[in-house]
Image (cartoon, helix red, strand yellow):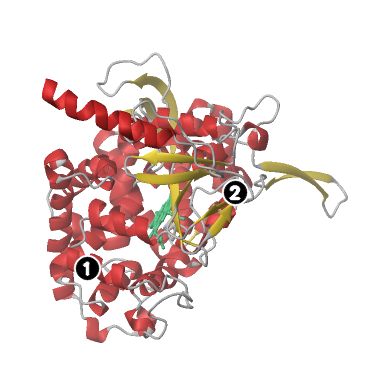
Amino acid sequence: MIALLILVIPLVVFLASVHRQSTPNQPPRLGETIPFISNVWQFMTAKNRFIMRVSMALRTSPIVQCQLGPLKSYFVTGSEHVPMLFKSTMFTSDPWVIHIIKHTAGYFPVDVAKFLRDDSGSSRQPRVRSTKDTIPASERIWYALHQNYNATLSGPQSVKTVCTSYQTFFEQQLTTVLAAKGNSELLLFDFIKKNMSRAAVCAMFGPDIIDTNPGFMEAFWKYEGLSEPLTFGLPSWLNREGIEARNTVRDMCTRWYKCANYEFAWERLEADQDTIWEPIFGSSLSRGLARWGKSFDFSTEGMGPVYTLFLIALNSNTVPICTWVMMELIKDPDLLQAVRRETTRSTVLSGASTQTLDEQKITSIPLLQSIYAETLRLHVGILITRTSLVPVTVAGYSFPAGTVFHAPTQVAHLDEITWGVPGHPASEFWAYRHTQERITKNEKGEVEKHLEFSLKGPPGAFFPYGGGTAMCAGRNFAKAEVLLTVAILVSKLDIKFLEWLKPDGSPSDRPAWDDTWYTNAVAAPPDREMKVQWETLA
Ligand code: HEM
């Protein structure tokens, strides 16, 4: 022990002296008690306290430098600087994405190498400084992946197709739960987590991925809960449980992919059929991922991690966001009633006997849009990360190519000056924050009042989906999925609050707050459960 101290103390003193040497023309630094250790330790173990310190530091300077272990990076806020990070000619998220596919998803080294080799970027035009300017588009792996998202996920037709399947699956789940439990007490977060994610997986990949893998959804949620430490890329002996959980889901995805790929009649697929939902692969996004993998020579086993990572993207944010929306509505019966009124108007008949909700109408209701934006503002806590491709100047400071920057959503989203209004501080939920009243006259000349959705705030004040070419490809589906789920629940059920529960099931004397385990990674789920009484509406 003494020998260890003799070795360690001089090293820490040396590092401290190097660390404290003031570097001219550098942004202020986030202090740390033990150089190279305190910040990274807090970043990994007390994430909320870490981001609060960053937030405080960013009040006095729009850029703050931070030593995270061996990595020096810069935290940025403000309407001039955050949008700059989204310029794909100057900044890239590629190194960060490589980190995620490698550690969080467990892509095989041979496949990670394909991303590492291609520095031409995700845009249609290869990066000017790319060494592969002349390579054909078919070999540009980043670009091909983005093309697939554009063609199969982001557009209105893709969203409509997946939403129609999602609604069918979610309604089936709800009918099953109601048949089993009837009008009874229910744990809200548990219900949404189990049923929303199951319906989303069936809509995106078809039901076989769940049906042929007993315990699939349970294995997924276990992995999801352990996925954040995986991102740190710790050696397996330090995160054995996380790696095992990831590999379990990866193996299940591989098993399903093998069968789906064998059964699917690829050669008979007509281009115009590719927009439909079919039970083997599910959505066109799912078939698109398979085609993309084939064109870049992924092995069958190599496709497991591709679908594993997509499962995280699909569920990790929408499930907590939908839960928070429902919790706010249940806490405020008048608001719930207002939402019920609005959504009932948007019900459309899709066939002789079935009633489905029109996702375009639902996502255009001003009050629902405002509630959704407000929930994202309060609960999405993500560090958007970019690396500079060229020498850049940010907030008056110069940085070489290869510098890492983070834009924390919490700092911008909770800014009192931008979002606070009298009686409704930025830290609190207010359903009408992003609406304004418009007064018009109808044909009879009578005055009518309408709500309009209006997201105020300068550029860089609200970016729950990131920005630029790396911006969330699933954002349109996410919004439709969350609001459809809310609309289905409020239009079919009368739901009343009973009590808050701690994770161990005992009563809690406070409502739910953000679960800080998820800070900086995805939307935070609630750290308390809401027990409700529900009854089907006549
Ligand atoms: C409320 C829900 C969601 C939030 C807050 C969210 C947030 C994000 C963020 C912050 C990023 C990184 C963006 C950047 O670095 O600039 C991202 C990427 C991505 N998200 Fe989402 N997401 C949500 C839902 C979804 C859903 C439902 C899907 C799939 C259906 C999805 C698919 C993706 C994909 C594929 C990417 C990678 C995009 C790329 O690199 O081109 N997301 N998301």
* Residue at x 52% of width, y 61% of height: 391
> Do we see residue 351 in this rendering?
no
In depth, the one of 446 and 134 nearer the eye is 134
Mark positioned earlier in the residue sequence (1 or 2): 1
Q: Quadrant of residue 414?
A: top right
In depth, the one of 506 and 411 nearer the eye is 411
* Residue at x 12% of width, y 50% of height: 214
Using the image, determine if residue 364 lies above or below residue 277.
Answer: above
Using the image, determine if residue 224 lies above or below residue 135.
Answer: above
Compared across the picture, whether 313 is left or right of 383 comes to: left
Residue 155 pos. (x, y %): 48, 68
The amino acid on which the numbered mark 2 sits, given as a three-letter code, is Gly
Using the image, determine if residue 196 lies above or below residue 494.
Answer: below
Whole-Å distance between the Cαs marked 1 and 2?
A: 34 Å
> Do we see residue 368 in this rendering?
yes
Say whether mark 1 is within 8 Å of ligand 1: no
Q: Quadrant of residue 265?
A: bottom left
- Mark drawn on residue 111: 1
Quadrant in which the N terminus appears? top left
Compared across the picture, whether 305 is left or right of 77 comes to: left
* Residue at x 24% of width, y 47% of height: 233
Quadrant in which the C terminus appears? top left
Residue 58 pos. (x, y %): 56, 36
The amino acid on which the numbered mark 1 sits, given as a three-letter code, is Asp
Residue 338 pos. (x, y %): 59, 37
* Residue at x 24% of width, y 26% of height: 9
In depth, the one of 41 and 224 nearer the eye is 41
Quadrant location of ligand 1? bottom left
In the rendered image, which residue does mark 2 sit on? 460
Residue 434 pos. (x, y %): 64, 42
Label 1, secondary structure: give it.
helix
Label 2, secondary structure: give it.
loop
